Image (tube, rainbow, N blue to C red):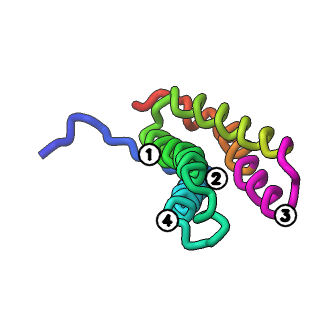
Amino acid sequence: MKETQKTKITKIPNSVTLTQIIILVIGIVWIGFSLYMAIGPDPSFAQLGAYRWIMAGMTFAPGLFLVVMWFLLRKRWKPAWYLAVIALGLMSVVIIFDQVGWVDVLVMLGSAIPFVLLIIDRKWYLKTKN
């Protein structure tokens, strides 16, 4: 039986895979931190009352957003690339306005590295699928 249509398998670059893994890990960490704050096993979070739920929601939202961006970037949905670049760029810059400690530097790097990798691999994300 002859195959009438050629199937073309495109190899995913290693940097694209790395970017997607980092975005997924960051999203899961944000969601995990949100759940930690909501459950409140740390006495300092338990004493915050309703404010801890606000903080939990504020950390859950970017985590959920990044997990959704991970899913959509894997599908090569073009608007997801733009949204992810904007979000990661803002996340990298906004952290400067906090008291910068070693955790803040890690969070900044966690946002900046996939931001740079997304820009480097923009042709792969924005190329039309055949």
**Residue kind at label 2, given as amino acid type:** Ser
- From the top left corner, tell me how far across and down residue 75 is, in percent: 42, 40
| Structural distance between the alpha carbons of marks 1 and 3 | 29 Å
Image quadrant containing the C terminus: top left
The disc, 3 or 2, on the residue closer to the chain's N-terminal end is: 2
Q: Taking the image as drawn, is residue 34 in sight?
A: yes
Give the label on residue 15, or none: 2
**Residue kind at label 1, given as amino acid type:** Phe
Q: Quadrant of residue 124?
A: top right
- From the top left corner, tell me how far across and down residue 48 is, in percent: 62, 57
- Give the label, 3 or 2, closer to the camera: 3
Q: Tell me the residue at 75%/47% (across/down).
A: 112
* Residue identified by numbered label 1: 71
The disc, 1 or 3, on the residue closer to the chain's N-terminal end is: 1
Query: Tag 3's secondary structure?
Result: helix
Mark 1: few, some, or many residues within 10 Å (few <14, many ≥20)? some
Give the label on residue 11, or none: none
